[in-house]
Image (spheres, rainbow, N blue to C red):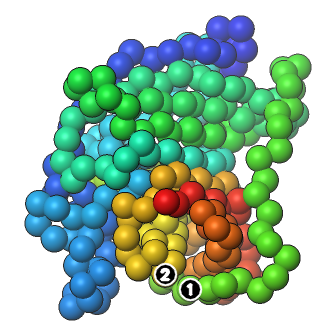
Amino acid sequence: MIHLEVALGAELPPVEFSWASSDVQLYNLALGAGTDPTDPGELSYVCDDTPQVLPSFGCVAARFHATEPPNVSFPGIDIALANVLHAGEQVRVLAPLPAAGRGRAITRVADIWDKESAAVIVHETTVTDPAGVPLWVERQSLFARGEGGFGGQRGPSTTVNAPDRRPDYTVRVPTLPQQALLYRLCGDRNPMHSDTDFAALAGFPAPILHGLCTYGMTCKAIADTVLGSRVSRIRSYGARFAGVVFPGETLCVDIWTEDDQIIATVTAPDRQNAPVLSSVQMRIV
């Protein structure tokens, strides 16, 4: 249930958290880093003390040590977890993220859009260091089935179209059968990714891979392919979740480069190129 007048603009209490280089290493391993343990680029993601930090890590850092399933409960919002799908994710970093640190996160409900059969709830989280210096800003969109029709605005289009030409790069990214079980250790304990019966309640024949895992894997694939694994060049990264991934599938990432912008799409070739991520956009320096 959504009470628009209560929910819109509502702010959660600040969350204090910390992360260590071992957390970054685990996150990178959960995205597939280290597949070739002799490759210097791969080793840069898992080296001790100073592993490279993808901007997508900012989307999980505050909940990295969570052991309970998440809930969707804000002032004026109370929705069953089985009715919620991740719709989109964006992160903007003010500078390359450190391999270890402390943060203070403040999350507010930035927008709620009425899609008639569903609602899209947009959370914005601003993270600062203990001195108040901004580190990153995350915007997360949640698709809540059956929660639309409340008379709100439909919202703007956020589609990022790929250029009308062949991709500059095409990358195949394999996922492991146990990928979702590994990624759960990064703090997302939603049973939709590990419990067959719970996944069935959401209409899936088997547990699905976390959208944020696919999102992070794509971020890494773009960084490795276009930037020579120089993660420090990334300033923002975002995508819309267009479809599900089942652990064990191989993904196809098509990439276009245009000045300081990189655009990509992700599909599942084994399911007739079913869309997985759309409107993938990365800004670099």
- Which is nearer the eye, 262 or 273? 262
- Which is nearer the eye, 187 or 133? 133
Placement of the N terminus among the 4 image quadrants: top right
Question: Height in image: 276 above or below 112?
Answer: below
Q: Is residue 217 left or right of residue 75?
A: left
Report if the CB atoms under discs 1 and 2 are less than 8 Å apart: yes
Badge 1 or badge 2: first in the primary sequence: 1
Q: Which mark is residue 191?
A: none
Estimate the spatial distance between the alpha carbons at disc 1 and disc 2, rounded to whole Å: 8 Å
Where on the picture, by quarter, is residue 134?
top left
Q: Report helix, strand or loop for mark 1.
A: strand
Instruction: Name the residue that disc number 2 marks.
Output: 225
Q: Report helix, strand or loop for mark 2.
A: helix
Q: Is residue 3 left or right of residue 235?
A: right
- Which is nearer the eye, 277 or 237? 237
User: Which amino acid, by three-letter code, is at mark 1?
Assistant: Val
Could you classify mark 1 by the number of other residues whose Cα lies within 10 Å: few (under 14), some (14-19), or many (20 or more)?
some
Instruction: Name the residue that disc number 1 marks.
Output: 171
- Residue 285: in sight, yes or no? yes
User: Which amino acid, by three-letter code, is at mark 2?
Assistant: Thr
Question: Height in image: 234 above or below 120?
Answer: below
- Residue 181: in sight, yes or no? no
Q: Is residue 86 left or right of residue 174?
A: right
Q: Is residue 182 left or right of residue 180?
A: left
Residue at x-position 50% and y-position 15% = 11
How many marks overall? Answer: 2
